[in-house]
Image (tube, rainbow, N blue to C red):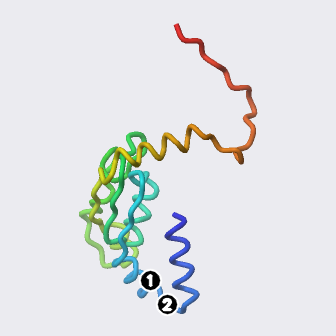
């Protein structure tokens, strides 16, 4: 979502029309660590991205096949440009350096986030039996 916002803003500041922005996205290839979630996979379809490559699957929220295959687009045809764009699919391939992607996530979560807000409730430690 950050990349979409950044590129859209930059291209519009450069005076590109919505049609030119759409054409730019149709030539973009995105590489990400984890399979895009349902919301992001839908947004990528909406902007008309060309291809997405990801490392590990997102077994809880994956929008490129793990939960929903939003990268396949819609089979509906429409004369309305916005509706047609929403239904556009994109090439998607997962498993690219999956072990390394999982390792990056493990390291990230083990370190914790020092900027995260303090929990409102105390964390309950469970005893192992």
> Residue drawn at (59%, 12%), measured in percent from left and top?
127
Is disc 1 in contact with disc 2, using a CB cutoff of under 8 Å? yes
Rendered position, 45 above or below 14: above
Secondary element at image label 1 = helix
> Residue drawn at (40%, 82%), measured in percent from left and top?
24
Q: CA distance from mark 1 to mark 2?
A: 6 Å
> Residue drawn at (57%, 37%), measured in percent from left and top?
110
Left or right of residue 74: residue 82: right
Sequence-wise, which precedes: disc 1 or disc 2? 2
Of residue 35 and residue 33, the one placed in the foreground of this image is 33
Please provide percent x and percent y for residue 25. Answer: 39, 77
Please provide percent x and percent y for residue 17. Answer: 48, 89
Please provide percent x and percent y for residue 73. Answer: 29, 62
Rendered position, 50 above or below 40: below
**Residue pointed to by mark 1:** 21
**Residue pointed to by mark 2:** 16
Please provide percent x and percent y for residue 128. Answer: 54, 11
């Amino acid at each position: 979502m950050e990349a979409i916002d950044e590129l859209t803003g930059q291209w519009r500041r450069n005076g590109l029309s919505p049609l030119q922005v759409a054409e730019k996205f149709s030539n973009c290839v995105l590489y990400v660590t984890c399979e895009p979630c349902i919301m992001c996979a839908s947004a990528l379809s909406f902007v008309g991205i060309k291809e997405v490559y990801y490392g590990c699957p997102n077994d809880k929220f994956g929008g490129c096949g793990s939960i929903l295959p939003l990268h396949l687009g819609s089979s509906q045809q429409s004369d309305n440009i916005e509706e047609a764009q929403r239904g556009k699919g994109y090439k998607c391939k997962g498993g690219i350096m999956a072990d390394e992607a999982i390792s990056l996530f493990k390291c990230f979560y083990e370190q914790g986030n020092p900027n995260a807000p303090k929990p409102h409730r105390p964390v309950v430690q469970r005893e192992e039996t």
